Image (spheres, rainbow, N blue to C red):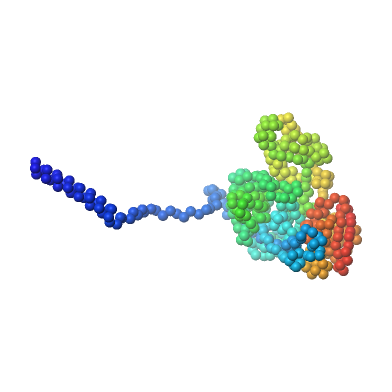
Amino acid sequence: MRKFQNVLFSVLLAVVGGFIAIYVYTNYFEKPKIVTVTEPRAVQYATLPSAPQGVDLTIAAEQTVAGVVHIQTEYQQQAYSSGNPFFDFFFGDPYNQQQPRMQQASGSGVIISTDGYIVTNNHVIENSQTIKVILNDKREFEAHLVGTDPSTDIALLKVDGEGLPSIPWGNSDELKLGEWVLAVGNPFNLTSTVTAGIVSAKARGIGIIGAEMSIESFIQTDAAVNPGNSGGALVNTRGELVGINTAIASRTGSYSGYSFAVPVSIVHKVVEDLKEYGEVQRALLGVRIQTVNAELANELKLEKVQGVYVAAVEPEGAANDAGIKEGDVIIAINNAKVNTSSELQEQVSKYRPGQKVIVKVLRDNKEKEFETLLRNTRGGTDVVKNSMTVLGAELEIANENTKANLNIRSGLVVTKLYDGKLKDAGIKEGFIITHVNKRPVNNVQEMNEILKQSKGGVLIEGKNKKGEEGYFVFGLN
C-alpha cells in the first residue's frame, strides 16, 4: 500500500511539473507564430452581362461595324459679349477683339444607303462649319448637311460615294423587353467599338431634348455607351438598325448603367421627310396631354390605369374638329395602344399633316373612335415647304478674310441664286447675309431655324462685296 502511494505521488508530481513547465515556457519564452494557409481568391473583374447560350452576337457585329462612321466637326466658339451693345461697340471684348477660335468635336453616324446618306444626332453636328466623315476602312469624306430635326435630335448628312457599306432598317416596334441589342460607335475616339446589352425599357421620356415640341420615346438599354457614341447604331441580333444612340444616364458624363436611343420608327420618318421636303413634316393632334397614373385614374373613375389624358384641346386643332374633348382618355392611335405621353407622341410622329388617323378614346368608360385629320405646325393640312427652298439660293459661311474686310463677325454668302424670295427682293450673288429678323446668323442651320419661327415678313440685313449695307423685306407665304 505504501509502495502504491509512492508511485501515485510520483505520477502526480510529474503531471504538476509538466503543467508548470508549459506555463513557464508560454509566458516567459517567445510565443509561436500562428499561420493560416488558405486558397488564394481569384481576382474579380467587372464585366458586361454575357449573352445566354444560343444567342450569337458575332454575326450582327461583323455586319454592322463597317456601316458606322466616325464624325469630326469644327465649329466657331461664340464671341464674347458683355450684353451691352454700346459697350461692345466702343470697347470690344476683353481679349482685344481676338478672332473666335475654332473648336473640334466628334461623334458617330450610321450609313443608311450605299450612295452616302448618313444619320446622326443633331447635337453632334450642331453649329458646325465643317463635317468630316471617316469610314471604318479609314476613307475620309467631306459631308454636307441635308437637314436637321432638333425636336427628335436627328440630322441627315450626305457624302459623295457609291457602294458604301450600309445598315438595313429594322423595326423598333417589334423590340421586346429583355431582347439583346448591340451599340456600335466611336466612344472616346476609339473607332469601331461594339458593346452588348438588353432592352430594359421602351417609350422612355427623360426630358433632355430642349427643342420646342420635342419628341422623346427612347429605347432604354444597358449596353455601354460613352461620349462619342452619340449618333451611332443600335442594332438587333440580325444586324438591323433599330435605333440611334443619343444619350446616357450618368452623373459623371460616362456610362453608368443606362443608355437611350431614338427608335427607327421615328428616325425613318424624319429621314424620309428631310430627303423629300428638306424639313420634317410634323403632324399635330392639337391637344395638351398627360400620362394617366393611379391617382388620375381614380379621379376619373376609370376601371383600370391606362391611356393618356386630354388636359386641353386647341380650339382650331385636329382633335377639336374630330370631336375629341377635354377629359377624354386616348388609348390607341390606329389600333396601336398608348399608355404614356411618349408612346402617343411616337405614334403621331409616324404620320404627316393631311393624313387621317383613328383615335380611340375612353369617355365615361366607354370606347369611342374619331377619324382625325392631322394638322401641320401652322394649323393647315398642307406639306410645309423648306424655308431655304423658298428663298431660292445656295449659301456658304463667310470666310475669315471676308469677315475681316467687311468688319463683320458672322455671315452667309449668297453663292448662287435661283427663282425665289431672295432674287425677287433684289439680292444679288455675293451678298453677305449677316442678320435675319435682327438675329445674327453663323450658319445655314441657324438661318433656317429663324425662318421656321418667322410669321409674316422677314427682314434680311447684310453687306455686298464693297461693304455697302443692304436691307431687304419680304413675306414667306
Q: Vertically, is 476 above or below 1?
A: below
The percent position of residue 139, horizontal first and vertical second, equals: 67, 65
Q: Is residue 399 left or right of residue 26?
A: right
451 and 161: which one is in front? 451
The percent position of residue 411, horizontal first and vertical second, equals: 81, 63
Q: Vertically, is 19 above or below 109?
A: above
Residue appearing at x 64%, y 63% in the figure: 137
Q: Vertically, is 335 above or below 166?
A: above
Task: Name the quadrant containing residue 355.
Answer: top right
The percent position of residue 259, horizontal first and vertical second, equals: 63, 50
Task: Name the quadrant containing residue 140.
Answer: bottom right
465 and 28: which one is in front? 28
Residue appearing at x 36%, y 53% in the figure: 36
Residue appearing at x 65%, y 47% in the figure: 219
- Residue 448 can be seen in this image: yes
User: Image quadrant for the N terminus?
Assistant: top left
293 and 203: which one is in front? 293
Residue appearing at x 81%, y 43% in the figure: 375
- Residue 335 can be seen in this image: no
